[in-house]
């Protein structure tokens, strides 16, 4: 199961569009974009649960109580750190393509971590540190999945 937290209607709408492209459906069988109004019920505390290509939702308090072993990922419509739109223009996430084609993804991730940590005081500050953190987290997941 994967859980997303959407703090704005824009984030919710963008996530529904993405999930529809990936073939997800609401538990009722409807397409994700059929129910864009559903963000209003929980507002900035809206959480989306993904399980076996089906979508359910709840509020953040419920998730924090009921799903202690699951990480909650904040979904941002135009997230320049975790989901930059310019990396999806060819129909495949660039990082997924790199993992599939480059024999040594570990070196790619390490070089990006070093790059972003080294340049943060001179270029994008906190955003670069978050990018370094993204690559470190992704490398950890990659290494754990490779066992």
Image: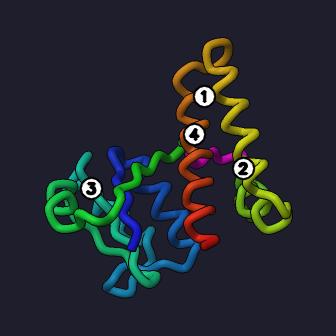
15, above or below 114, in the image: below
- The answer for how far apart the CA atoms under marks 2 and 3 are is 26 Å
Q: Which residue is mark 2?
A: 87
Mark 1, secondary structure of its residue: helix
Mark 3 Cα within 10 Å, few/some/many (few <14, many 20+)? many
Give the mark nearest the N terminus, 3 or 4.
Answer: 3
Front-most of residues 30 and 15:
15
Q: Which residue is mark 4?
A: 81
Mark 2, secondary structure of its residue: helix
The coloring applied to the image is rainbow
Q: Nearer the viewer, mark 4 or mark 1?
A: 1
Magenta segment: does it hold 85? yes
Give the mark nearest the N terminus, 1 or 3.
Answer: 3
Residue at x 67% of width, y 12% of height: 122
Residue at x 85% of width, y 63% of height: 103
Q: Which residue is mark 3?
A: 46
Q: Residue 60 location in percent, x, y?
A: 21, 55
- The answer for how far apart the CA atoms under marks 2 and 1 are is 16 Å
Residue at x 62% of width, y 20% of height: 120
Q: Which residue is mark 1?
A: 128
Give the mark nearest the N terminus, 2 or 1.
Answer: 2
Highlighted range, magenta: 80-86
- The answer for how far apart the CA atoms under marks 3 and 4 are is 21 Å
Give the mark nearest the N terminus, 2 or 3.
Answer: 3
Give the mark nearest the N terminus, 4 or 1.
Answer: 4
- Quadrant of the image for the N terminus? bottom left
Mark 1 Cα within 10 Å, few/some/many (few <14, many 20+)? many
Q: Are marks 2 and 3 in contact (CB under 8 Å)?
A: no
Q: Nearer the viewer, mark 1 or mark 3?
A: 1
- The answer for how far apart the CA atoms under marks 4 and 1 are is 8 Å
């Amino acid at each position: 199961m994967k859980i997303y937290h959407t703090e704005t209607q824009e984030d919710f709408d963008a996530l529904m569009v993405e999930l529809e492209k990936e073939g997800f459906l609401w538990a009722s069988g409807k397409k994700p974009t059929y129910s864009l109004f559903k963000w209003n019920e929980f507002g900035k505390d809206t959480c989306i649960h993904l399980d076996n290509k089906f979508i359910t939702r709840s509020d953040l308090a419920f998730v924090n109580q009921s799903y202690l072993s699951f990480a909650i990922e904040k979904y941002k419509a135009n997230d320049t750190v975790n989901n930059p739109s310019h990396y999806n223009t060819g129909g495949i996430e660039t990082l997924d393509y790199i993992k599939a084609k480059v024999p040594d993804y570990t070196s790619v991730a390490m070089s990006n971590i070093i790059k972003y940590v080294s340049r943060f005081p001179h270029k994008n500050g906190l955003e670069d540190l978050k990018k370094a953190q993204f690559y470190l987290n992704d490398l950890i997941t990659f290494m754990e999945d490779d066992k």
